[in-house]
Structure formats: C-alpha cells, structure tokens
Image: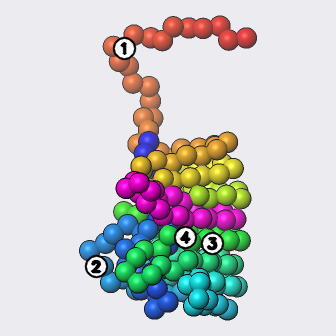
C-alpha cells in the first residue's frame, strides 16, 4: 500500500500569499492562505513570524490548527525553509474526495538544498498519527521525505481498513510456503 502522506502548510510572506510552497502544486500559483491567531509577532530583523493561541491556517489545500506556529520567512523570491507547528497539531487535507487527518504534538517542516540535492522533510512527533479512509498509521515519530516520496515511522503500528480486500479466500496455482515450527 502506498501511504500518501499529505501536505503540511504554506506561508511565503507576511502578506500571507502561498507561492512555491510545500503544499502540492495546483493549477493556480496565486492561492491565498489565511492565518488566524490571538497573537502574532513579526520579527522583521530575523524575518521570523510567530503565531500564538488558537492558530488556524486556512488554505484550499489544507486546514491546520495548533497552539503555536513559527515560520522563518525567506528573502523575497525564495521559499520558506522552516515551519514549526506545536501543541495539539491537527492537519486536515482533502484528497480525491476524502479527507486525510494528521495529528501530533509537534510538526516540523524543513527545506534545504545541499550540493544540488533537494531535501524536503516533515517530521511529526509527540503521539503522531495519520488517519486515512483506508487506515491509520501511528508511531513515536513519522517522517515524510517529500523529495524521495518515502514515509518512515519509528515504532509504528498500521491499521488497514481497506475496502478492496477479498472477502473470501481465492485459490491460486502458486506453490505453498514451507511450514515452519515456531515455538
């Protein structure tokens, strides 16, 4: 089963416009992202923005809630390379008519280019879980390397609720596996 982890969130400037972001591209490149919170701190010298208390990120591609969101804003024309969402992180992502849900205590997004190699990673920690219509993945840490399109889960448990599983045994002409005595 190919587990499709989903997008995280997009912020690209204080103007709250999503540009070339972590969220999968869509036909429109000028998608608006609205961010709500009780408090926002814009550190112009460091280009860091911190949203506190009842943070809501509303974007057509994702809906995120958490208690604190910190983003390192890039120079103009560049993309965000660091976003951290903390405390009661919930991400709802529409995907082919269904909604996927990821939860964790902390979600960290990083983007780097080292020696010409792109690295784009989301790491979920603190009771992370990914819920899809066909199953749930939990672990102590769930990491999605978007550049490699791989998902890694430490101490994982996956529960599969597939609707396409056969309801009866199907006979084949395959050779049976050898029986082993396991004590």
Please tell me which residue is depicted at 44% across the width and 56% down the height of the picture: 114
Please tell me which residue is depicted at 64% across the width and 90% down the height of the picture: 41
Magenta stretch, residue numbers: 97-122
Q: Helix, strand or loop at disc 4?
A: strand
Find disc 4 in the rendering and name its residue: 82
Queried whether the magenta region covers residue 28, the answer comes back as: no
Find disc 2 in the rendering and name its residue: 28
Q: Residues within 10 Å of mark 2 (few under 14, many from 20)?
A: few
Measured along the vertical axis of the image, is residue 136 above or below residue 98? above
Find disc 1 in the rendering and name its residue: 174
> What percent of the width, then of the height, locates residue 54?
67, 84
Q: Is residue 39 left or right of residue 77?
A: right
Q: Could you give the CA–CA distance between mark 3 and mark 1, rounded to whole angstroms?
A: 49 Å
Please tell me which residue is depicted at 55% across the width and 70% down the height of the picture: 82
Q: Residues within 10 Å of mark 4 (few under 14, many from 20)?
A: some
The mark closer to the camera, 4 or 3, is 4
Q: Could you give the CA–CA distance between mark 2 and mark 4, rounded to whole angstroms?
A: 23 Å
Queried whether the magenta region covers residue 104, the answer comes back as: yes
Q: Could you give the CA–CA distance between mark 2 and mark 1, rounded to whole angstroms?
A: 49 Å
Residue 85 shows which numbered tag?
A: 3
């Amino acid at each position: 089963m190919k587990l499709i982890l989903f997008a995280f969130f997009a912020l690209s400037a204080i103007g709250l416009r999503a540009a070339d972001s972590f969220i999968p591209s869509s036909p429109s490149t000028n998608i608006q992202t609205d961010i709500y919170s009780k408090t926002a701190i814009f550190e112009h010298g460091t280009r860091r923005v911190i949203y506190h208390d009842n943070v809501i990120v509303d974007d057509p591609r994702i809906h995120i809630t958490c208690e604190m969101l910190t983003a390192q804003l890039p120079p103009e024309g560049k993309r965000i390379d660091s976003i951290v969402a903390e405390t009661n992180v919930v991400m709802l992502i529409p995907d082919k008519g269904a909604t996927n849900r990821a939860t964790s205590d902390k979600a960290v997004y990083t983007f780097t280019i080292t020696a010409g190699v792109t690295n784009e990673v989301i790491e979920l920690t603190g009771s992370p879980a990914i819920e899809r219509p066909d199953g749930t993945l939990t672990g102590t840490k769930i990491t999605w390397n978007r550049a490699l399109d791989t998902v890694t889960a430490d101490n994982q448990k996956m529960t599969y609720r597939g609707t396409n599983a056969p309801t009866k045994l199907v006979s084949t002409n395959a050779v049976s596996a050898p029986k082993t005595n396991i004590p």
